[in-house]
Image (tube, helix red, strand yellow):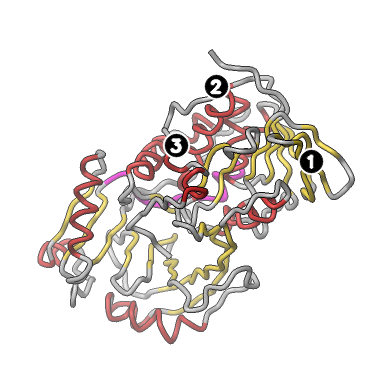
Amino acid sequence: MARVVDDVVIVGGGVMGSALAYWLTRLQPGIAVTVVERDPTYRQASSALSAASIRQQYTTPVNIRISQWSLAFLRQTAEHLEVEGDRPDVGLHEGGYLYLAGADGAPVLREAHRIQRDYGADVVLLEPAALTERFPWLAVGEVQLASLGLSGEGWFDGYRLLTSFARKARAQGARYLRAEVVGMKRAGDRIDAVLLDDGRRLPCGVVVNAAGPWAARVAEFACIDLPVRARRRTVFVISCPTPLADFPLLIDTSGFWIRPEGGRFIAGIVPSEDADDLPLEPDTAPFESQFWPALAARVPAFEAARLERAWAGYYEMNTFDHNAIVGPHPDVVNLHFMNGFSGHGIQQAAAVGCALAERITTGRYAAVDLSALGFERILEGRPLLELNVIG
């Protein structure tokens, strides 16, 4: 039996906050949901600047389950998020992820494959000969083993997903306010109100921190230390004159990733400087010094690659264990988190939004059990280790 929850305030209207607003207003029609978003253009939102890809090749069961649930949702986005006959197409393309491993990484890839198969992921291991036969444009070199997602992995239009969640949430009664949260009124184990920069005070039965890279600042308003930091990631847009058939999202042994995007490719590499809160301007210096040499060695056709442009967005990096922090705080019972996705947020939003909405309205998870992602592990020093981390 659903319990009645009123006055939910969501801090942040990106894909996480908007997915939660959609699910809350769907699961409990008439619920009062207010989404506070300081920039409705989403110019600097991680959701809008994401590479918008989805995979099942994780090594933690909770992440695999989240991706499977979210993938099923993405396949039916037009039905779920239709508003007045407009059925949004998020352009889901199940092109797969291809992980490459050398001698040191091959045992890890085999163990990851065992876990993924145990949880129903459609993933296959490829030895070098099979890899060359399937992808003749690939230089195998030192590669000892590869893992390929045959279905249930790929990429999509992340900005369209974000705006479609927000539009449907509004159509179902959610209210969006253009404002910035500057404080919270805490009384014991509860947050009574959220304070805005324009002087307004929003009473709340429940408050949700969905502030993305700025989540730690919001948590401080409740005197809580949240290990989430804004880490800049640059995305390169590359053209290649040679057609390359059946190109998946490739993760190289050197650490770079690359995938098709329209008639071009987008790619990235972990930066050598990974400080907090760097200016949100693309850093193209690693393209010539690190990225292009590794890319051309792996895919010789990219020797003629051209950098067309670049953009930068923030990962909301959970510096504790690179996994999401979801659910209520054990000491502030009406404060919930959906933070620290460390580059996985856009692909996990549909499932996390649904599960957290269930937790808020019924007191338990149903769609996906997110208990493993709870705040308790931070307080107890129990990291949830994920072996397949990109970036």
Q: Within the image, what quadrant is residue 278 found in?
A: bottom right
Q: Which residues are magenta?
A: 151-165
- Name the element at disc 1: strand
Label 2 Cα crowd, 10 Å radius (few <14 / some 14-19 / many 20+): some
**Residue at point 30%, 61% (across, down):** 247
The numbered mark at residue 185 is 1
Residue 262 included in the magenta stretch of the image: no
Residues under labels 3 and 1: Cα distance?
27 Å
Q: Quick one: which residue is furthest to the bottom in this view?
A: 289
Q: Within the image, what quadrant is residue 275 found in?
A: bottom right
Where is residue 248? Give x, y as percent: 31, 59
Which circle, 2 or 1, is nearer the viewer? 1
Residues 81 and 349: in front is: 349
**Residue at point 51%, 75% (across, down):** 308
Residues 204 and 113: in front is: 204
Residues 118 and 282: in front is: 118
**Residue at point 32%, 53% (across, down):** 95
Q: Is residue 192 above or below residue 3?
A: below
First of labels 3, 1 by sequence position: 1
- Residue type pointed to by label 3: Ser
First of labels 2, 1 by sequence position: 1
Where is residue 356? Give x, y as percent: 53, 33
Label 1 Cα crowd, 10 Å radius (few <14 / some 14-19 / many 20+): some
Where is residue 337? Give x, y as percent: 58, 42
Label 3 Cα crowd, 10 Å radius (few <14 / some 14-19 / many 20+): some
The numbered mark at residue 371 is 3
- Name the element at disc 3: helix
Q: Which residue carries the number 2 mark? A: 362
Where is residue 9? Give x, y as percent: 71, 36
Q: How many marks?
A: 3
